[in-house]
Amino acid sequence: MKLNKGILLGGLFLALLASGAVYFLNFNNQEPAVRNISSNKSERCVSVIDERKLLSGDIIFQESKSRQSKTIQKVTGSRWSHMGIVVYRKSSWQVLEAVQPVKITPLQNWIKRGKNCDFVVKRLKENLFKTEAELREEIMAKFKKYKGKSYDLLFQPGDDKIYCSELVEKIYARMGVSLGEWVPIGSLDLSSPEFEKLKNTRFKKIAKRQSKGIDEVFEQDYKSKLIVTPISIFKDKQLACIMGCSF
């Protein structure tokens, strides 16, 4: 009986230690690794992201609900109209993105902004650095050049203003990796009513300032300019799919 009582006491002691360890882990890591993400009730939008699978530097895509999203989808022939780079900083997952202005957004909030909360995560197959921490630091250093800049409504290749896929391409390009393809705007599908409406809205002031027609300004000054689209990066063979691969 003494032996059995000793075993029972020992087991109880170990159980107490284990529960204390679990409490300690939960106290220091209160956010669950597998997270349910839901938006407002009217959209009934629920998604699940396994944060254990994420690494800083992952590239995330979504179908934006912005006013220009439908135009981007028509022009590029792709569902995915917005994208950003995932990083782990300040004890949470966040997304570097080019909206108005270029900024850092909590991952949960970023996913909620997308249609149905759907997303795809892709990752560069090549390891650029020995550790994830080194990659994160390098990405954040490159991001500083663009943080706070205005969103580029005309999708031009300069650095004064930035659009979403351009931000991702340029950050990786500055680390020696060329993602996607820069193509002339005129090579995209510009036949949709959505694009015509966007063109007339965004080039109206420029045309008036130059005393030209909107079509004339676009043909002469913008149609040959190069653009990198979300779908061209999405399809880049240097990337492997990590999450959302069934879409």
Image (cartoon, rainbow, N blue to C red):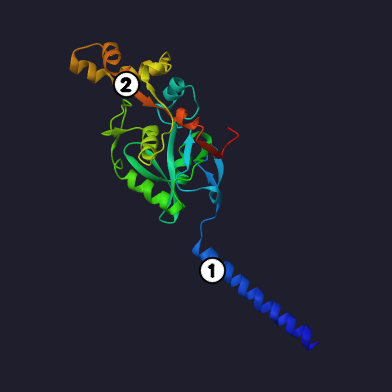
Q: Residue 225, labelled with which disc?
A: 2
User: In the rendered image of this protein, does residue 63 appear above or below residue 108?
Assistant: above
Residue 84 lies in quadrant: top left
User: In the rendered image of this protein, does residue 50 appear above or below residue 163?
Assistant: below
Dot 1 falls on a residue whose secondary structure is: helix
Relative depth, front residue between 223 and 181: 181
**Circle 2 Cα neighbour tier, 10 Å, few/some/many (<14 / 14–19 / ≥20):** some
Q: Is residue 78 visible?
A: yes
Q: Amino acid at mark 1?
A: Phe
Relative depth, front residue between 151 and 54: 54
Q: Quadrant of the C terminus?
A: top right
Dot 2 falls on a residue whose secondary structure is: loop
User: In the rendered image of this protein, does residue 163 appear above or below residue 37?
Assistant: above
Q: Is residue 35 visible?
A: no
Q: Which residue is mark 1?
A: 24
Residue located at (47% from left, 43% from top): 58
Query: In this rendering, would 156 be left or right of 85?
Result: left
Query: In this rendering, would 67 be left or right of 31?
Result: left
**Circle 1 Cα neighbour tier, 10 Å, few/some/many (<14 / 14–19 / ≥20):** few
Counting from the top left corner in percent of width and height, residue 98 is at: 36, 37
Q: Quadrant of the N terminus?
A: bottom right
Give the CA separation, mark 2 to mark 1.
56 Å
The reply to whether discs 2 and 1 touch (Cβ–Cβ < 8 Å) is no
